[in-house]
Amino acid sequence: MSQLFDITVEPQNIRLDENGCGETTVTVTNFTSEGRRLLVQLVTIHPQHQNWLKLEGDRMREFAANGGSHQYHLDINVPADKFKGRFNFRLDVYSASKEEKLVQGQNVTVEMKPQSKQSIEQPKQNFSWLTATVMVLLLLNVGVGVALWLLFMETASQQISSLKDMANTAQTHSNQLIESANQAFTKAKPAIEAANTAVLKATPAVETANMAITQVEKARTLVQMALTEANQVIRNTNRYQDNGNGTITDNSTGRIWLQHANCFGPTHWEQAQQLAQQLKSGECGLSDHSQAGDWQLPSQSEWQEMMNNPYHNPALSNTVGTDKWIEGQPFLDVNLDGYWTATPFALNNDNALIVHLDNALVSASDKTNRYYVWPVRTK
């Protein structure tokens, strides 16, 4: 057995409730032939995330040999008003003296559940005291002006309540329109692919008969209509789409990027290529059923399409595409240092091109130097 200690987390993708609460169970197993005293340690990208995680029980425990294990219960409590989106954590195992890290656990993704939109609170209406006051004033035949003013205020309160009901209805209608736009975008993509297939089939017929030419023109018209519809839908959607399985789709290019921008750490060029090509579902937070060979290092041109030059530190946009990237929208753990491209340097075979995420500049570096790895795939 290659791994002497094992860390299992169930579940690995945790979706919190509307109050930002959730839980998971971590099992640590000792497969060595001797009993060990082990210490477990929670690790997060940002220190503030540590405050949201509570590991119950002692972190240092005695483990029996040959399969001795312990379970740790982890409670998660995230302030809903301070954090939106996702963050990662992992559990590492150390020797009792913490001088040696024995095994590093897999990343666990924690996702906040979107809070339901609350209707605008209706003002409390107290008609009893208004009505009683008006009746007393009228019976006493005094303060007629005051009584009329109170009746006016009661009517105004009812009108305000009616306006707030209309605002709630408008909000609901707006949400329905957004959902319809998302569905239209999904339907538009197959239409474009079908139209492109029609053009490819029609092109050889152009050389054989006038009838084929007519068919090609009709196909081109369909393609234009489909492209126009698709472009309109794309303009009304976000730049990036979170697929909920550890991947992010760039709607402007159709390419699929790994959501975790620093799963492997810095490494040299040859190993970066191997890590990207061997990536598969179940690793780096993926649950997309991808297989080894589906992923690759991005080329220079793919990186240039990804970069958003108006922004710096990093040169990436947020999910919507209207502002600079922030953690979790939509990518996780983005570094400002260099990332490898799959493109060798044409003037020196010992070098390859890297992209600097702080300013989107491209430069050449020796392939033995260590830079970060961010895989991409096209299907």
Image (spheres, rainbow, N blue to C red):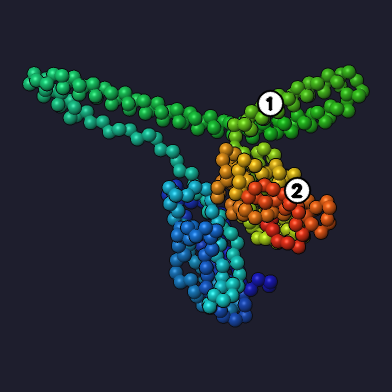
Which amino acid, mark 1?
Thr
In the image, is residue 121 above or below residue 288? above
Residue position for label 1: 228
Q: Residue furthest right?
A: 208
Residue 62 vs 107, above or below: the answer is below
The picture places residue 305, in percent across and down from the top left corner, at 70, 42
In this view, which residue lies farthest toward the bottom? 34
Q: Quadrant of the N terminus?
A: bottom right
Whole-number angstrom distance, CA of label 1 to CA of label 2: 29 Å
User: What residue does disc 2 label?
Assistant: 299
> Badge 2: how crowded within 10 Å, few (<14), some, or many (20+)?
some
- Residue type at mark 2? Ser
Up-down relation of residue 34 to residue 86 (above or below): below
Instruction: Tell whether 119 sits left or right of 200.
Output: left
Secondary structure type for disc 2? loop
- Residue in the picture at 69% in, 58% down: 371
In the image: residue 275, left or right of residue 111: right
Q: Secondary structure at mark 1?
A: helix
Occupied quadrant, residue 204: top right
Nearer to me, 92 or 169: 92
Give the image quarter of residue 146: top left
303 or 278: which is nearer to us?
A: 303
Residue name at image x 36 percent, y 25 percent: 163
- On the image, the x and y values in percent for residue 169 come to 43, 28
The answer to whether any part of residue 282 appears in the image is no
Instruction: Write the residue at 61% across / 48% down.
Output: 314
Compare marks 1 and 2 and give the one earlier in the sequence: 1
